[in-house]
Image (spheres, rainbow, N blue to C red):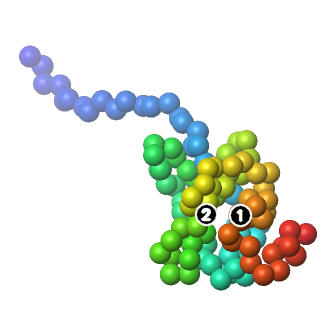
Amino acid sequence: MPNTPILPTRTISPVKTPFGLSFLLEDLVFARRWAEQAGLALEIALDRTVDGAEFEELLRVTTRDRAHCLLTIWRTERGVVGQEARGLPLIYGSVRAALAAARLLRPRGWQRFLR
C-alpha cells in the first residue's frame, strides 16, 4: 500500500447572506445621540447569531447600567426592524422612524431629531 498522506477534507458551505445587515454610519451616530438625549445607552453588537439568524450589526437601546434592553433594532433588505422588549418586531423605513415609534423611549425634545 503506497504511503499517501491523509488530508482532512473540508466541506465548503454556500455563502449565506446574513439576516441582519450593517447600518449606515449616519444612522449609528444619530442613534447614539438619541440614546444619550434620552438618558439611555446604545450598544452596537457586531457579528451576532440570535436564534440561528446571523446579524452583521444589532443596535440595543438599554438602561444606562445596561441591565435592561428596551429596544433592539436591526436592518434587513426590506427595511429597519425595531422590537421593543415586550413587543413584536415592526418594519420601519429608517432608524429615525424606529426610534420615533418607540412608545416608552421618547426623550425630551425628541421631535427636533427627526428633522
Left or right placement of residue 21 versus residue 26 in this view: left
Q: Is residue 34 above or below residue 74?
A: below
Which residue is identified by label 2? 71
- Disc 1 crowd rating (10 Å Cα; few below 14, some 14-19, many 20+) is some
Identify the secondary structure beneath mark 2: strand
Identify the secondary structure beneath mark 1: loop
Q: Nearer the viewer, residue 11 or 104?
A: 104
Query: Which residue occupies 69% across, 49% down?
Result: 90
Whether tag 1 and tag 2 are in contact, CB under 8 A, the answer is yes
Query: Which residue occupies 20% across, 29% down?
Result: 6
Query: Which residue occupies 65% across, 83% down?
Result: 39
Q: Is residue 37 above or below residue 98?
A: below
Residue 57 place in picture, x, y as percent: 59, 57
Label 2 sits on what residue type? Leu
Quarter of the view holding residue 61: bottom right
Please say whether residue 24 is visible from this viewpoint.
Answer: no
**Residue that lies at the very extreme toward the right in this rendered image:** 115
**Residue that lies at the very extreme toward the left in this rendered image:** 1
Which residue is identified by label 1? 102
**The N terminus - image quarter:** top left
Residue 83 place in picture, x, y as percent: 62, 55
Q: Nearer the viewer, residue 22 or 32?
A: 32
**Residue that lies at the very extreme toward the top in this rendered image:** 1
Q: Earlier in the sequence, mark 1 or mark 2?
A: 2
- Disc 2 crowd rating (10 Å Cα; few below 14, some 14-19, many 20+) is many
Residue 88 place in picture, x, y as percent: 61, 50
Q: Nearer the viewer, residue 54 or 110?
A: 110
Please say whether residue 45 is visible from this viewpoint.
Answer: yes
What whole-number distance in Å separates the C-alpha atoms at marks 1 and 2?
A: 8 Å
Label 1 sits on what residue type? Ala
Query: Which residue occupies 63% across, 49% down?
Result: 89
